[in-house]
Image (spheres, rainbow, N blue to C red):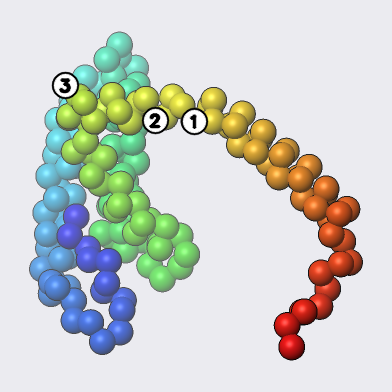
Amino acid sequence: IITPPNNDMPHWPPPFDARVMKAVNLFFSCIFTAEAVARIGATGLLFSHDAYLRDGWNIADFGVLMMSWVDELEILEGGSVAKLMRMGRALKPLRLMKRNQGMRALIDALLATMHPMLYVVVFMVFNFAVFSLVGVGLFGGKKFRCSAP
C-alpha cells in the first residue's frame, strides 16, 4: 500500500521507515483478507450461484491478495518471481476501484475495446512492414555513409 517507488535509489532517503512500511502493509493485507473471508463465507467460494470466484473483479481481488501474502510471508524471496509478486502490489488500488461504479464501467469499457484494438494493431504492423520494404527498395545502399565533413 505505501511502498515508495524510490526505496532502491541511491542517495535518496526513504520517505518511511522500513519497519513502518512492513507493519502497514501487513495491516492492510489482514484487513483485505478479513474482507475476502467474510465475502467467501457469505456467498460461497465457487459452487453457489453468486460465488466469490464467479465475478471477474473478485478473481482479480483474490489474485492481488495471494500476491500480497506471498510477498508478506517472503515465500519467494530473492528471485525474479519474488520481484513479480512485489509488482503485484501495484494492483492493490484495483480493489478500491471496484467499489466505484463509474470507474468500474470505465475499466470494463477499456477491457472490452482490447479485442477490436487487436485488428488495428495487426493493420498497423502490416502497413509498417509494407512501407519498410518499399523504403529498403528505394533507399537500400544509398545512405551508407555520412555526407557531413
Q: Are marks 3 and 2 in contact (CB under 8 Å)?
A: no
At horizontal 30% and vertical 46% (from top left) the residue drawn is 91
- The amino acid type, in three-letter code, at marker 1 is Met
Query: For this view, does 115 lie left or right of residue 28?
Result: right
Query: For this view, does 94 lie left or right of residue 39?
Result: right
Q: CA distance from mark 1 to mark 2?
A: 7 Å
| 3 or 1: tag closer to the N-terminus | 3
| 3 or 2: tag closer to the N-terminus | 3
Assign a secondary structure to mark 2: helix
Identify the mark at residue 32; answer none if there is no mark: none
Identify the mark at residue 42; answer none if there is no mark: 3
Quarter of the rendering containing residue 36: top left
Q: Determine which residue is flagged by label 2.
A: 110
On screen, 28 above or below 56? below
At horizontal 25% and vertical 59% (from top left) the residue drawn is 72
Q: Are marks 1 and 2 in contact (CB under 8 Å)?
A: yes
Query: x, y percentage for residue 75?
Result: 36, 61
